[in-house]
Image (cartoon, helix red, strand yellow):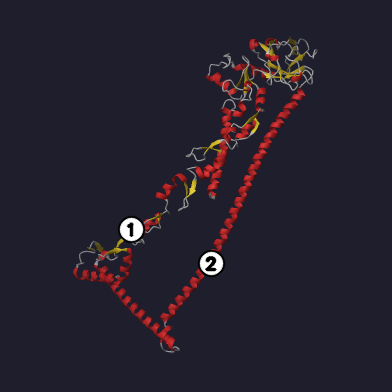
Amino acid sequence: MSKNCRYKFLSHFYRSHCYSLIRVHVCSLIMPGYSLAAVDQSGIDEKSLCPKCKGLLKEAVQTIECGHRYCKTCVDALLNHGDGKCVIDRSNIIPEQVFLDRFIEREIQSMLVHCVHHDQGCDWKDELKKREDHEAVCAYVQVPCVHSKCGELVTRANLVEHLEHSCKFRMEKCGYCHALVENAFMKGHQESQCPSVPTVCPECDRKDIPRAQMSAHIDPVNGDCEGVLSHCLWTQIGCSETKVWKLRLQFKRKTLVSGWSIVSAKIKYLSLYQPFTSFDSFYVNGVNLPAQTELEHFSKQVENVLKENDELKSKVVEQEQRIQQLEGAGQNGPLPGNSAGAALYSPLGEDLLNRINTGEVKIADLEVLFVEGNKLNEEIQRQVSSIARRQESWNGTVDRLQRQFESMSHSLALRNVMMTDLDEHVREQQVSSHDGVLVWKISDFAKRRQNAVTGYETSFYSPCFFTSRYGYKMCARVYLNGDGIGKGTHISVFFVVMRGEYDALLRWPFRQKVTFMLLDQNNVEHVIDSFRPDPNSSSFQKPRRETNIASGCPTFCPLSEVNNHAYIRDDVMFVKVIVDTTDL
C-alpha cells in the first residue's frame, strides 16, 4: 500500500472506530434487555430476565402492584404504546408504582458473561458492566466499510484486509498517469480518460503515443506522424503536389529553390498581365494577393534573397577549396607564409574559430551545471528519504502513545469503579448499626415531600442496619405522600429484608417484631406502630435477590398530623425502626 493510501486508510479507520463507539453507545441507550451469548443463556435465573423482551434486565424496575421486574424501556413501552398490563398476571401497571431496583441492577451488572460474539470466536469473559467497553474494541463486531458506496459489513479484525484487497471502491494508483482512482472505475479510467495510456496511431500504426499527445501527433502542420497527408507549402501559389509527411520532408528540401522560382514567376506574370491601377488587391487561385506596389517590393526582396543565396553558395565553395588546399599542404610539408595557410586566418576563418570556441565554453558550462544539478538532486532525494523515515518513526511513536493512552484510560475507568464501590461500602459502614435499631435522619423534607407529590421520587430507602454483627440485614422504605390505601393521606413506612453475607447461618423465615416510630423532636408525642411478620409472606423468606418485597404500614401517620407536633424541625424528620432481638 502506498504511503498516501495508508494515511487515508488510517484516517478512515479512526473514523470507523469512533463510529463504532458511538453506535455501541446509542444502541445501549435505546435497546431493551441485554443480549446474551448462547453459552450464558442456560445459567441465568429467570428472575433476572425481562418477561417482555426476554433479555437480561437493563435498568431494572419493579412494580409495586405485582412485584415483577422489567427493563425500564419495556415498562415505558407497555405504558406508552401497550395496554398498561403486566405480561405475566395481567395486573395493571401504575406509573407511580414503578421504581428503579438499584439492588438487582447492581447484581446484574456484576454477573460474569461472555461476549455476544462468543460463537464467532471471541473468548472475552468478564463482568457485564465491562462488556460495553469491550464491544467498542471487539475484533468480531461487524462494522460498515468506510467507503459509503461499498456498504459491506465486515468484522473489525478483517477491516484492514477488506480495505486493502477486497473493497471495490478502494483507492489505487493508475499504472500510467499515477492518479488515485477507485478500483471499480480503474478499467473505465484507463479505457477512456487516462491521458498517459499508450494508444495506436490510426495513420502510421505507431503504438507508444500517449492519449493526450495523439492530437498533436496527427496535426497535418506541426505533427510528426509519417502517415498523415499534408499539402506542399507552395500549394496556395500554384503547386498541386500532395505527399505524406516523410516524403514531404524530402520534397521540401529538393524543391526549396523551385518554390521561390514559382513565386518569382507568378509575380512577374502578374506584373505584366494583370492591371493594378483600379484595385489594391486581387485573387489568384483563391489566394488574396497584395497590391501592385507591395508586389514590386516583395519581388525586389525575393531577387535580393536569391542573389545573397548565390553569393553564399560561391563563398561556401571557395572555403571548401581552401580547406582542401590546406589539408594537402599540411600533408606535403610546412605551410608557405603567403599561401593557403594565410587564408586560414582570414576574417571569416577567425570568426568561425571564435564561434567554435564560444560554443565549447558554453557546452563546458552546461556540463558543469548539469553535474551540479545532479548532485543537488541526489542531496534532495536523500533529505526526502530521511524525512520519510522520520515521519514513519513519528507515526510509530504516535500509535504507541495512542495504545498506551487507551490502556491507561481503561485502567483509570476500572479504578474509578473500584473507588465508587469502596466509597459506598465505607458510607454504609459509617451509618449502619448492629443492634437492631435504626435512627434515620431525613433531611430536605419539603423538597422530598414535593417530589413525592409530583411523582418525581415517590419513595426512597434508608441506610441498611443489622440485628447483630452477623445477623439479619435490613432497611426501611418511606413514602412521604403515602402508598396503596394511604396514598395522598398518610406517610407510609415499610420494612425491607435484604440479602446479607451470613444468611446461611440465620433462622428463616424472619419472625422478629418490627416497630416504627416518627419522633417528636420535643419528646411530647411520638407516632408509634408495630407489626409481626407473616411467616408465609415472601417478604420474610430468605432473600434470593438483593432485597425482598417491602412490607409494613401504608397508613403509618396521617399527613394532617405532621404539622401539629414537632415532627418536622429545620426541614428535618427522624424515623426510628426497632427490631426485637430478645429471642435471637
At horizontal 31% and vertical 66% (from top left) the residue drawn is 247
Residue 487 visible at all: no
The quarter of the displayed image where residue 258 is located: bottom left
Q: Position of residue 122 (x, y in %)?
A: 60, 35
The answer to whether 72 appears left or right of 563 in the picture is left
Front residue of this view, candidates 558 and 289: 558
Q: Nearer the viewer, mark 1 or mark 2?
A: 1
Q: Secondary structure at mark 2?
A: helix
Residue 382 visible at all: yes
Q: Quadrant of the C terminus?
A: top right
Whichever of callouts 1 and 2 sits on the residue coming sooner in the sequence is: 1
The answer to whether 23 appears left or right of 279 in the picture is right
Front residue of this view, candidates 307 and 578: 578
Mark number for residue 157? none
Q: Is residue 226 above or below residue 388?
A: below
The answer to whether 75 appears left or right of 183 in the picture is right
Q: Is residue 233 above or below residue 453?
A: below
Residue bearing mark 1: 203
The quarter of the displayed image where residue 557 is located: top right
Q: Secondary structure at mark 1?
A: loop
Front residue of this view, candidates 257 and 66: 66
The quarter of the displayed image where residue 474 is located: top right
Q: Position of residue 563 (x, y in %)?
A: 71, 12
Q: Residues within 10 Å of mark 1 (few under 14, many from 20)?
A: few
Q: Amino acid at mark 2?
A: Val
The answer to whether 473 appears left or right of 357 in the picture is right
Residue bearing mark 2: 371
At horizontal 66% and vertical 38% (from top left) the residue drawn is 409
Q: Amino acid at mark 1?
A: Glu
Q: Residues within 10 Å of mark 2 (few under 14, many from 20)?
A: few
